[in-house]
Image (spheres, rainbow, N blue to C red):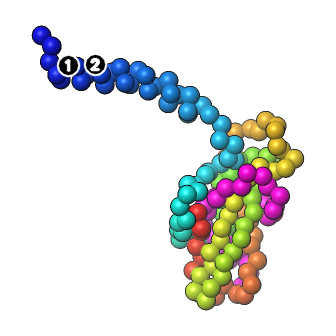
Amino acid sequence: MDSIPGRRRIAAAAFALLALPALLVTACGNSDNGGAQANTTTAAVSTPTEQNPPQPGRMFTANSTITNPHPLPFDSWSRVAPDRIAVNFQIGSPECYGVDATTTETDSTVTVALKAGTLPEAAGRMCTMIAVFGTLEIPLKKPLGDRKVLSAN
């Protein structure tokens, strides 16, 4: 006896069998992102946590020559000096990936747009899949004071 619920179960099973290979192929793809990657179609701002005392990761130097840059949110920061902060993030191998940052300062906020990308010297070469806790120090135009630090991601 054919029933509509039975047909739906068969159709659902057939769909699952057809969709599973597509999902597996997508999951095995390479996005070449060096770690965390944010949705680049929306401009969101988050409020990272201030670390006191600071717990820096591996120190990075801003590198404006990174290729394929994409937004990299950071979830914590610390005061280094009155006019200097350090942002903490996760990224792929430092031998392959670098960061750059731009800041927008107002009287009440300091918004940091952190970007990650491939180092020019690593283009086209194999990179190990590791996650590294990184830190980037960022100079400010004027002392931070009581301004809020934001992550543009």
Q: Amino acid at mark 2?
A: Ile
Look at the image and tell me in which quarter the C terminus lies: bottom right
- Relative to 15, say whether 137 is above or below: below
Badge 1 density bin: few <14, some 14–19, many ≥20, Cα 10 Å? few
Q: Amino acid at mark 1?
A: Gly
Residue 142, percent across and down? 72, 87
Q: Nearer the viewer, residue 134 or 12?
A: 12
| Figure label count | 2
Left or right side of 113 for 59: right
Residue at horizontal 68%, vertical 52%? 91
Tell me, yes or no, if residue 104 can be seen here. yes
Please give the label number shown on residue 37.
none
Residue at horizontal 56%, vertical 28%? 25
Q: Which residues are drawn in magenta?
A: 59-86
Look at the image and tell me in which quarter the N terminus lies: top left
Secondary element at image label 1? helix
Q: Which residue is mark 2?
A: 10
- Relative to 153, say whether 131 is above or below: above
Report the Cα–Cα distance between label 1 and label 2: 6 Å
Q: Which residue is mark 1?
A: 6
Secondary element at image label 2? helix
Task: Specify the quadrant of the image occupied by residue 15.
Answer: top left
Asked if the magenta segment contains residue 81, the reply would be yes
- Relative to 72, say whether 85 is above or below: below
Residue 37, percent across and down? 61, 52
Q: Are marks 1 and 2 in contact (CB under 8 Å)?
A: yes
